[in-house]
Image: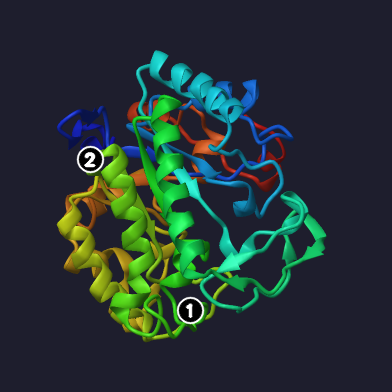
Amino acid sequence: MPANLFQAYTLNSSLTLSNRILMAPLTRCMADNDLVPTQAMVEYYARRAEAGLIISEATIIRPDGQGYPNTPGLFTPAQIQGWRAVTDAVHSKGGKIFAQLWHTGRVAHPHFFGDGKVFSASAQAVEGSVPRMRELTYQTPTPASLDDIKQLVADYAQAAANAIDAGFDGVEIHGANGYLIDQFLHHDSNRREDEYGQTPANMSRFALEVVDAITARIGADRTALRLSPGAYFNMGADKRDREVFDYLLPQLQKRKLAFLHIGIFDDAMEFDYLGGRVSSYVRSVYKGTLVGVGSYTAESGSAAIEASKFDLLAIGRPFIANPDYVARVREGKELLAYSDAMLAELV
C-alpha cells in the first residue's frame, strides 16, 4: 500500500484532507436541460466521498460559457440548490468538495445559449466541431472588450460566492485545457495589442484579476487554480508561452492559494521548452501546494509525492471505473479497468 497517500494533509487553517488522493474534475454532461445537477449526480459524487477532496466536474459561470451539452451551471437559484444536494451528500459521508468554475471561451457555441457572442482573448477560431454534437462547428470568437473582461471577472467572483452558498468547501478556477482563461495565457489564442496581450504581464492579467476577485469574495484559502503550461488542447504550441508562466507563477505564489493543479495530462508528457515534465517546471517556480495529474497510478503517484514532485495526487478515469477507488488502493484490491463505455452513464 502506498502509505503516504493516506496521510492527512492540511490544506488551510480550516480544511484538513483525510488523505492525499483527489478526485479530478471529470466532465460527464449529466445535468438536466436547465443545467441543474440531478439526483444521479448526487449519488455519483456521494459514492466517491472517501477521496481526500473531490473537485467537481467543470461548472459554467454564466450561460455563454457553455460549450458541451448538459454541463451544470452555478448561476441560477435552481442550479445552486441542485449543487447543495450534492455537497450535502458528500459531507454526510465525511467528504470534502470544491467546485471547478468554468467558462469555455472560444469553445462555447450559441446553440446552447441562443443569440449571443462567443468570447475569447482574440478572434482566433478553434477548428472542428462540438463533441457529442458534431453538426455544430466552432465559430470565430469576438475579442472580449475591456468592459466584457470586467464583467467576466465579476461573474467569476459571483459564481464563487454561489459555490459557497451551495455548500462547496472552496473552488478551483479552471484556467487550463484551452478554455477562456487559458486562451489569454497562450500566444496562439491571444493576439491582443492592449493591456491584456503581447507581454507576459499583460497576458497574465486576466487570470490574476479573476483570482484576485474570487479571493476577495471567498478567501484565498478556499481558492485554487488549474493551469496548463503545456498539454495544448484546442491550441497550438508556442515556446514563448513559458515566459508567460515564468511571470504568472511567482505572482500566484504571493497570493497563497489553496493549491495549484496541473492541467489535462500535462505530467504524462515532456516539453523541451519547460525542461521536462510540467510538475518539475511548476515546482521549480511555485512553492505552494501542488496537485499532480497525468496517468499516474497510486504507486507512481505515491513515489512522486515521496520525491516532492507534488503534494497531492489527482485521479481521473480510474475514479469513474472505481467509485471505491480509495478503499481499493488502501486494501490492495485490484482496480476495475476504465472503458469509454462508462462515459455513457453515471456509475
Q: Quadrant of residue 287?
A: bottom left
Screen quadrant of the C terminus: top right
Q: Which mark is residue 47?
A: none
Residue 300 visible to the viewer: no
- For marks 2 and 1, the one nearer the N-term is 1
Which residue is labeled 1 in the image? 190
Screen quadrant of the N terminus: top left
Q: Determine whether, in the image, residue 117 is placed left or right of residue 88.
A: right
Q: Determine whether, in the image, residue 131 is placed left or right of residue 265.
A: right
Q: Quadrant of residue 229?
A: bottom left
Residue 212 rendering spot, x and y as whole percentages: 28, 53
Residue 12 rendering spot, x and y as whole percentages: 18, 36
For marks 2 and 1, give the CA distance.
30 Å
Q: Residues within 10 Å of mark 1 (few under 14, many from 20)?
A: many
- Determine the residue positioned at 39% across, 35% down: 161
The residue nearer to you, when weighing 295 against 248, is 248
- Determine the residue positioned at 80% across, 62% down: 136
Which residue is labeled 2 in the image? 221
Local SS, label 2: helix
Residue reaching furthest to the front: 147
